[in-house]
């Protein structure tokens, strides 16, 4: 890539750029990646960047790290249009859009306090995913989560 | 079709064809449900696992099983809670599966029946999971409508607590499979959630709502009354006002459709005046009887027995 085009932070040699994050969700993406103030990872975050395709977007760049499938699935729940760019030797080696899974397991906590998945029973939470807008339906109690999904991520 | 359905967990699992199949099976069994005994399920054992008290559901399952010639293992709420103290429901279900051919479960947690179905080696029938589902109630409601009114081109008013009353949600869902014209009648505090209304419309129901019962009385085939719980109202005077406004009395029937029927899942408290009981419109006691043929039908279906 040609540095300077959209590069508001210094280029990274190897790592991951999560692009086209819904504006306002960058911090939640960091949370999904387990990045806190005390992490040693080198991270840069750009928020409310204007872009041709979305009005405003956030971008997260992480050095020396590629994402696990489960992290990508979680990102898809809060930012279904995000793209994952794998950076190798300063260039974009691979690019793909996140994909909403049809079902998510052990990723979201059911917001119904009386749901069997919130007890000591040997089950993990399972949700069916519906698109446009994203709605998660608990397969146990059928409770639907459609707002502030980030708050329910485990 | 559908003689292979194993578990009865939520109305959302059923297609209209499957519901029709169950209702037809209940028609076949209704005479037997009224009296006598057969050997259709001889040798089969039904476990009733009730973590919460219930009279109608538990007894009608018992009756259903006895009329079909089967036997019942009855674990009342007291035994259930003491026998299984500290044990997970998942373990209890695995154990009871080895003692019985099918299990009826009532449990206070929503989604418990779905989970039980994952662990059971025999069919699970949801007898009510918390504020969640109660599919056998919905099926007996549909059966009542089929027998005492008609499921096609139905005009129905559903009255009462439509916000928290989730059995009402499953009923509305099932009726939308029949393209019913549904009017929701409730105080504004207890309106049907927007999202559910959206789902119902998407499925083919015609949906409208009002706070005023008088507006719909004269144009419905079925008046389905539900209980309004005191706990929903922080202010008791507000509660009394609401209860008064939705109470059904004989005065309501001057210009209703001649064949209009009144249903209620029972127990009723203040919603229907006892003077209505002898009116030609009252059907709530028949409705409660219809729980027997419906549960007989479900038992034969989950146990894979032809009738
Ligand atoms: N070496 C690098 N260091 C840091 N960020 C980079 C690096 N290379 C690319 N990026 C960033 O990764 C993202 C994807 O880069 P790319 O060159 O594919 O941009 P693009 O053509 O705009 O892609 P898209 O069509 O996905 O928007 C951009 O946000 C870009 O700024
Ligand atoms: Mg771009
Ligand atoms: Zn749930």
Image: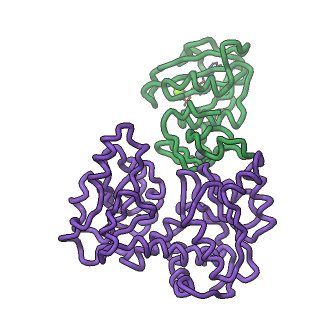
Q: Colour of chain A?
A: green
Image quadrant in which the C terminus of chain B is located: bottom right
Which residue occupies the foreground of this view, B117 or A36? B117
For the point 51% across and 42% down, the residue is A134
Q: Nearer the viewer, residue A43 or B110?
A: B110
- Position in image of residue B155 (x %, y %): 31, 68
| Quadrant assignment, res A2 | top right
Which percent across, then down, holds residue B187?
31, 48
Ligand 1 shows up in which quadrant of the image? Answer: top right
Of residue B83 and residue A2, the one placed in the foreground of this image is B83
Residue A69's place in the image compared with B25, above or below, is above
Relative placement, left or right, of B293 versus B247 is right
Q: Is residue A68 visible?
A: yes
Q: How is the image coloured?
A: by chain
| Count of numbered labels shown in the rendering | 0
What residue occupies the far left of the structure in this picture? Answer: B255
Q: Residue at x 49, y 40 (%)?
A: A146
Rendered hue of chain B is purple
Q: Position of residue A56 (x, y in %)?
A: 45, 24
| Image coordinates for residue B293, horizontal then vertical, percent | 54, 78
The correct choice, above or below, for A125 with respect to B40 in the image is above
Of residue B43 and residue A100, the one placed in the foreground of this image is B43
């Amino acid at each position: 890539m040609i540095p300077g085009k959209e590069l508001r932070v210094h280029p990274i040699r190897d790592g991951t750029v999560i692009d086209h994050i819904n504006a306002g969700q960058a911090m939640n993406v960091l949370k999904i990646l387990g990045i806190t103030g005390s992490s040693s990872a080198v991270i840069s975050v750009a928020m409310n960047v204007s872009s041709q395709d979305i009005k405003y977007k956030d971008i997260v760049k992480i050095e020396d790290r590629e994402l696990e499938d489960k992290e990508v699935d979680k990102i898809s729940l809060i930012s279904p249009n995000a793209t994952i760019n794998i950076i190798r030797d300063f260039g974009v080696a691979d690019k793909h859009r996140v994909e909403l899974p049809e079902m998510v397991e052990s990723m979201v906590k059911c917001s119904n306090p009386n749901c069997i998945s919130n007890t000591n029973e040997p089950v993990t939470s399972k949700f069916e995913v519906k698109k446009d807008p994203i709605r998660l339906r608990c397969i146990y109690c059928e409770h639907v989560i459609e707002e502030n999904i980030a708050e329910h991520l485990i | 079709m559908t003689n292979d359905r194993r578990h009865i967990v939520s109305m959302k699992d059923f297609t209209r064809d499957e519901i029709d199949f169950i209702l037809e099976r209940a028609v076949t069994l209704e005479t037997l449900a009224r009296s006598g005994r057969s050997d259709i399920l001889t040798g089969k054992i039904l476990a009733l696992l009730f973590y919460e008290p219930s009279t109608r559901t538990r007894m009608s399952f018992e009756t259903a099983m006895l009329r079909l010639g089967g036997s019942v293992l009855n674990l009342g709420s007291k035994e259930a809670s003491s026998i299984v103290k500290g044990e997970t429901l998942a373990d209890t279900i695995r154990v009871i599966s080895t003692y019985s051919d099918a299990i009826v479960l009532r449990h206070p947690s929503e989604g418990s029946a779905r989970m039980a179905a994952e662990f059971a080696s025999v069919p699970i029938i949801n007898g009510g999971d918390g504020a969640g589902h109660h599919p056998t109630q919905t099926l007996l409601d549909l059966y009542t409508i089929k027998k005492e009114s008609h499921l096609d081109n139905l005009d129905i008013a559903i009255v009462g607590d439509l916000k928290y009353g989730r059995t009402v949600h499953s009923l509305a869902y099932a009726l939308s499979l029949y393209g019913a014209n549904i009017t929701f009648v409730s105080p504004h505090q207890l309106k049907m959630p927007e999202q559910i209304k959206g789902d119902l419309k998407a499925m083919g129901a015609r949906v409208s709502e009002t706070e005023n019962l008088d507006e719909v009385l004269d144009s419905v085939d079925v008046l389905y009354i539900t209980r309004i719980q005191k706990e929903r109202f922080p202010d008791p005077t507000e509660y009394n006002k609401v209860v008064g406004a939705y109470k059904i009395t004989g005065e309501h029937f001057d210009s209703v459709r001649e064949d209009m029927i009144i249903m209620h899942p029972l127990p009723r408290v203040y919603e229907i005046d006892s003077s209505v009981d002898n009116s030609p419109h009252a059907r709530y006691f028949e409705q409660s009887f219809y729980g027997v043929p419906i549960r007989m039908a479900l038992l034969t279906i989950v146990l894979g027995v032809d009738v």
